[in-house]
Image: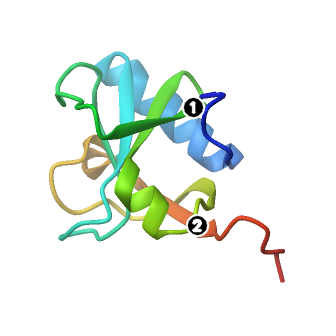
Amino acid sequence: MNPDVPHRLEATDSALRLVERVSSRHGRVILFISGGCCDGSSPICLPEGELVLGPHDLFLGEIGGAAVYIDREQFRRWNDPAVLIDASSGAAEGFSLDSLEQDHFTLRSRPAGATES
């Protein structure tokens, strides 16, 4: 975890199994939460080293050995959320490695200080 960032990063068992499955086929992977077009804010799964990380990319921590990053400004706009990486049935769209699988990564978040309902 990045000690300079007050946050919580968690993963469901389904997400951890998907990280393991994708990593076994493609080697080490990273997840990047883009908040952009296509799959919106679905985590994008890429081989480690394929995405050139910049000074504005914030390291949130690791799940199942996969580093998780988000754009620092995006994280701020989301009000420093608690982040939960999950997996759902069906292939992802786009160029994420999980598009080759039967499941895809999903994201759940809530603002810091909010409680689950």
Amino acid found under the numbered disc labelled 2: Arg
Q: What residue lies at 30% left-to-right and 40% top-to-bottom?
A: 56
Tag 2 residue: 108
Q: What residue lies at 47% left-to-right and 28% top-to-bottom?
A: 67
Of marks 2 and 1, the one in the foreground: 1
Of 15 and 59, which appears nearest the observer?
59
Residue 54, compared with residue 110, is above or below; it is: above
Gap in Å between the C-alphas at discs 2 and 1?
16 Å
Q: Which percent across, then down, holds residue 76?
A: 47, 60
Rendered-image quadrant of the C terminus: bottom right
Task: Label 2: state its secondary structure.
Answer: strand
Q: What residue lies at 60% left-to-right and 66% top-to-bottom?
A: 109
Tag 1 residue: 61
The reply to whether the C-beta atoms of the residues labelled 2 and 1 are less than 8 Å apart is no
Amino acid found under the numbered disc labelled 1: Gly
Q: Which percent across, then down, holds residue 37?
A: 18, 70
Task: Label 1: state its secondary structure.
Answer: strand
> Is 64 left, or right, of 106 in this rendering?
right
